[in-house]
């Protein structure tokens, strides 16, 4: 872990430096490569420690003040550790839920309905000549077929568009 310690209106002693490095070992165990920017300062009677950690594209920050600088550093480490654990837990939960969602999608695909009637459409069947049925089907460009009663035979017929898009087919019962 790369550590940068800065003192504002305060000289960073070797003891402070060692203490901060020792405490940041608790944070280092969560990341392979991390950077820490530590700022120590005094304002009136308060000792303020600010620790800013950047790791894996994430940023964590803690600022505390106390009468004792060492206590302030301890509080910051506790806060950072909590933030990091919370972030890791959130990521793990998202990964876990994501995999569960993928499993549900896969099981839904297996339950695909086949060989069953899933939609019923109702058409009005009118008596007409096959030529009139072609004209009626041309008036409805979204329909591919038209069921009608053939006036010449008195039987139910169907006229449908062929794949060439120019011609039509007639479906007529034999008996």
Image: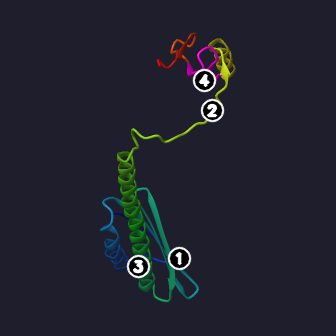
Tell me how far mark 2 sits from mark 4, CA to CA: 8 Å
Q: Residue at x 37, y 48 (%)?
A: 111
Tag of residue 78: 3
Residue 3, x across and y down, in percent: 38, 65
Name the secondary structure under disc 2. loop
Q: Check contact, mark 2 vs mark 4: CB within 8 A.
A: yes
Residue in the foreground of this view, choosing between 169 and 24: 169
Q: Check contact, mark 3 vs mark 2: CB within 8 A.
A: no
Residue at the spot of label 4: 146
Name the secondary structure under disc 1. loop
Q: Earlier in the sequence, mark 3 or mark 2?
A: 3
Name the secondary structure under disc 4. strand
Q: What is the quadrant of residue 161 in the picture? A: top right
Q: Check contact, mark 1 vs mark 2: CB within 8 A.
A: no
Task: Count residues near mark 4 (Cα–Cα under 10 Å), then give few for <14, some for 14-19, many for 20+.
Answer: some
Q: Check contact, mark 1 vs mark 4: CB within 8 A.
A: no
Tell me how far mark 3 sits from mark 2, CA to CA: 73 Å
Tag of residue 123: 2
Name the secondary structure under disc 3. helix
Residue at the spot of label 1: 9
Tag of residue 85: none
Residue 72 lies, with reference to residue 103, above or below; the image says below
Q: Check contact, mark 4 vs mark 3: CB within 8 A.
A: no
Residue 58, x across and y down, in percent: 44, 60
Q: Earlier in the sequence, mark 2 or mark 4?
A: 2
Q: Is residue 29 left or right of residue 36?
A: left
Task: Count residues near mark 3 (Cα–Cα under 10 Å), then give few for <14, some for 14-19, many for 20+.
Answer: some
Q: Nearer the viewer, mark 3 or mark 2?
A: 2
From which residue to which does the magenta span run?
141-159
Q: Is residue 165 left or right of residue 107?
A: right
Q: Nearer the viewer, mark 1 or mark 4?
A: 4
Q: Earlier in the sequence, mark 3 or mark 1?
A: 1
């Amino acid at each position: 872990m790369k550590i940068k310690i800065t003192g504002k209106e305060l000289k960073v002693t070797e003891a402070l430096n060692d203490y901060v490095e020792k405490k940041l070992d608790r944070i280092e165990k969560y990341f392979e490569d991390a950077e820490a920017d530590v700022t120590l300062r005094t304002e009136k009677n308060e000792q303020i420690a600010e620790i800013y950690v950047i790791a894996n594209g994430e940023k964590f920050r803690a600022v505390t003040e106390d009468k004792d600088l060492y206590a302030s550093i301890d509080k910051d480490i506790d806060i950072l550790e909590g933030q990091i654990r919370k972030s890791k837990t959130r990521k793990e939960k998202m990964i876990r839920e994501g995999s569960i969602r993928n499993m549900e999608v896969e099981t839904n695909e297996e339950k695909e309905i086949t060989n069953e009637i899933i939609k019923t459409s109702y058409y009005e069947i009118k008596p007409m000549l096959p030529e009139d049925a072609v004209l009626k089907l041309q008036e409805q460009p979204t329909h591919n077929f038209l069921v009608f009663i053939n006036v010449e035979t008195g039987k139910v017929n169907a006229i449908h568009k062929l794949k060439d898009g120019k011609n039509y087919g007639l479906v007529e019962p034999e008996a």
